[in-house]
Image (cartoon, rainbow, N blue to C red):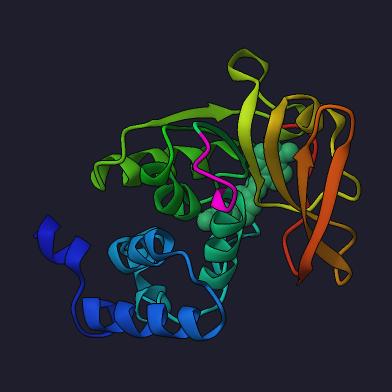
């Protein structure tokens, strides 16, 4: 039973996933390891059963608590942007949500430290990642705007919700050469940005306009 659920049938089958990978390629995702993860991670188990047949559309879908699972293109784009200059060892992810982005990323790096402010979402993500056999993830219920000092510095930081301006703590917890991928700005005007820490300065590149849920301080 569990195998059938993970493998998927019909609209959640491997064939449907292949079509999604093909679309992502056409949209410019070139990193083969990332595309392979999209092919192998069953996105349908991260959403409500009723939404399962829509899991391989390239759209965000509701996951409860007013939050969404990110659009596959965006997950792939952010992961690719993080990996571009070499594979980061120690990564911080802010905004675990349902854990889909975590599942795509984790096997591509040595360790993911992931923080989510909504406890039930974190609890569910934990179960799903375990089910998928993803083991190199540390989970924390907390406010990701503060980063995760105990495990800093990070080679990469990926933020899945948009702050109005980049939290200082995240920039501080980045290693020299490390990269921070973060959507910045108010709803309707967000830009995906990649910061790279250099010895004396912070490099900033725009990766285009995006739409994310807001990054909110505090926990629930
Ligand atoms: N990558 C996730 C997307 C989740 S949406 C996925 O694939 O499902 C963004 C998530 O960020 C939400 O779950 C939201 O609760 C969380 N979030 C918002 N502000 C946060 C904060 N300050 N600290 C940690 N998580 C936060």
Is 180 on the left-hand or right-hand side of 168?
left
Chief secondary structure of the magenta portion: loop
Say if residue 113 shows up in the picture. Answer: yes
Q: Position of residue 109 (x, y in %)?
A: 43, 39
Q: Is residue 68 above or below residue 200?
A: below
Residue 180 versus residue 219 in the image, above or below: below
x, y percent for residue 118:
61, 40
Image x and y of residue 89, in percent: 49, 31
Left or right placement of residue 157 versus residue 122 in this view: right
Q: Start and end of the magenta stretch? A: 83-88
Of residues 23 and 200, which is closer to you in this image? 200
The residue drawn where x is 49% and y is 71% is: 30
- The outermost residue toward the left is 1
Q: Residue furthest top?
A: 150
Question: For this rendering, which residue is in front, 179 or 16?
Answer: 179
Q: Is residue 10 magenta?
A: no
Residue at left offset 35%, top offset 68%: 44
Q: Answer with left or right where residue 119 lies relative to residue 160.
A: left
The quarter in which the C terminus is drawn is: top right
Residues 67 and 215: in front is: 215
Q: Residue at image x 80%, y 36%?
A: 217
Magenta span contains residue 84: yes
- Quadrant including the N terminus: bottom left
Res 131 quadrant in image:
top left
* Location of residue 207 in the rendering, given as x and y in whole percent from the top left corner: 75, 65
């Amino acid at each position: 039973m569990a195998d059938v659920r993970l493998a998927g049938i019909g609209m959640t089958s491997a064939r449907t996933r292949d079509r999604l990978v093909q679309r992502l390629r056409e949209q410019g995702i070139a990193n083969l390891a990332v595309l392979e993860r999209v092919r192998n991670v069953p996105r349908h188990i991260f959403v409500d059963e009723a939404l399962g047949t829509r899991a391989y559309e390239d759209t965000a879908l509701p996951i409860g608590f007013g939050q969404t699972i990110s659009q596959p293109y965006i997950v792939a784009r952010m992961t690719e942007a993080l990996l571009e200059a070499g594979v980061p060892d120690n990564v911080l992810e802010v905004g675990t949500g349902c854990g889909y982005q975590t599942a795509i990323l984790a096997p591509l790096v040595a360790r993911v430290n992931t923080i989510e402010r909504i406890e039930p979402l974190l609890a569910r993500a934990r179960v799903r990642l375990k089910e998928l056999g993803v083991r190199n993830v540390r989970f924390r219920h907390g406010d990701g705007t503060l980063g995760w000092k105990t495990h800093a510095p990070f080679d990469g930081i990926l933020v899945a919700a948009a702050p109005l301006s980049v939290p200082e703590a995240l920039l501080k917890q980045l290693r020299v050469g490390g990269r921070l991928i973060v959507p910045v700005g108010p709803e309707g005007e967000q830009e995906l940005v990649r910061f790279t820490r250099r010895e004396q300065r912070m490099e900033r590149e725009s990766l285009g306009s995006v739409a994310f849920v807001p990054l909110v301080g505090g926990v629930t």
